[in-house]
């Protein structure tokens, strides 16, 4: 993923994660990758991925189960 570092990075990460969800890379009901894992893969800070994941949660695309992680919501 090519990031434009002249603008906020977390919305770009959120867009990339939306593309992956739309492409079916993560099936509904499955556990979403951990923040640290995605941060390493995308070469960004974990806090950046946290903001992106929070945005997807607010959109209803992900949900979190306390102590278990984030999961892909049914569409």
Image (spheres, rainbow, N blue to C red):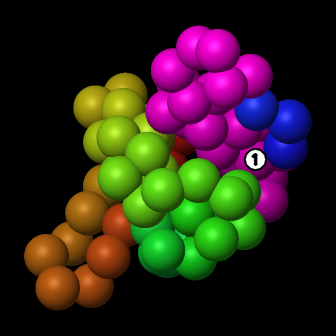
User: Foreground: 45 or 74?
Assistant: 45
Q: Is residue 6 above or below residue 55?
A: above
* Position of residue 75 in the picture relative to residue 52 (left or right): right
Residue 5, magenta (yes or no)? yes
Where is residue 40, by image quadrant? bottom right
Find numbered disc 1 in the image and state the secondary structure of the residue it sits on.
helix
Residue 29 at x, y percent in the picture: 50, 68
Location of residue 17 (image quadrant) = top right
Determine whether, in the image, residue 5 is placed left or right of residue 62: right
Q: Residue lying farthest top?
A: 7
Does residue 44 belong to the magenta stretch?
Answer: no
Name the residue tied to disc 1.
Answer: 20
Q: Residue at x 71, y 57 (%)?
A: 42
Return the x and y of residue 71 as percentages of the image width and height: 42, 66
Q: Is residue 74 left or right of residue 42?
A: left
Residue toward you, 20 or 27: 20
- Give the residues drawn in magenta, as a range: 4-28
Residue that appears at 79% across and 59% down: 25
């Amino acid at each position: 993923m090519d990031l434009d570092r002249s603008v906020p990075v977390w919305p770009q990460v959120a867009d990339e994660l939306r593309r992956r969800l739309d492409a079916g890379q993560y099936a509904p009901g499955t556990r979403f990758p951990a923040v640290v894992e995605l941060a390493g893969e995308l070469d960004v800070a974990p806090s950046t991925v946290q903001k992106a994941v929070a945005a997807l949660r607010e959109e209803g695309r992900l949900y979190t189960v306390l102590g278990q992680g984030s999961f892909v919501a049914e569409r």
